[in-house]
Image (cartoon, rainbow, N blue to C red):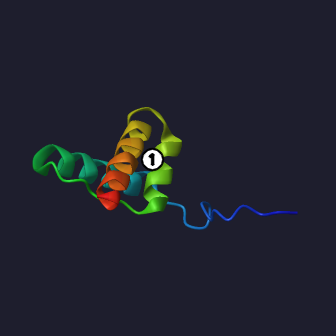
Amino acid sequence: MTTCPCDCAATALSDNQIDGWADCARYILATTGCSPMLPLEVLRALWKRGGEDRALAEKLHRVTIAEVAA
């Protein structure tokens, strides 16, 4: 049996923690134009929530990839 290399369930973030990361990321984007780099576990948690949080996670992922590649 093959196991998933993703250890997503190892560290469960609380809803308050995820909200805090999302609020902080949105604030940085809106006020500085810079792209915050969030931990992968936070991006995954945002993506799993769906809606605006998923859109934020996807945006941060795209922007981060572009900045790292530049």
Residue placed most toward the observer, 50 or 6:
6
Q: Residue at x 40, y 50 (%)?
A: 61
Q: Residue at x 72, y 61 (%)?
A: 4
How many residues crowd mark 1 within 10 Å: few (<14), some (14–19), many (20+)? many
Q: How many marks?
A: 1
Instruction: Say which quadrant the C terminus sits in.
Output: bottom left
Q: Specify the amino acid type for callout 1.
A: Leu
Is 25 rendered above or below residue 53?
A: below
In the rendered view, does 48 fall on the left or right side of 18?
right
Q: Position of residue 68 (x, y in %)?
A: 33, 61
Q: Position of residue 56 (x, y in %)?
A: 36, 42
In the rendered view, does 10 fall on the left or right side of 27?
right
Toward the top, the furthest residue is 51
The residue tagged 1 is 46
Asked whether residue 58 appears in the rendered view, the answer is yes
Instruction: Say which quadrant the N terminus sits in.
Output: bottom right
Q: Residue at x 37, y 46 (%)?
A: 62
Secondary structure of the residue carrying tag 1 is helix
Q: Position of residue 38 (x, y in %)?
A: 36, 60
Residue placed most toward the observer, 3 or 70:
70
Residue placed most toward the observer, 16 or 7:
7
Is 48 rendered above or below residue 51?
A: below
Toward the left, the furthest residue is 31
In the rendered view, does 45 fall on the left or right side of 23?
right
In the rendered view, does 37 fall on the left or right side of 14?
left
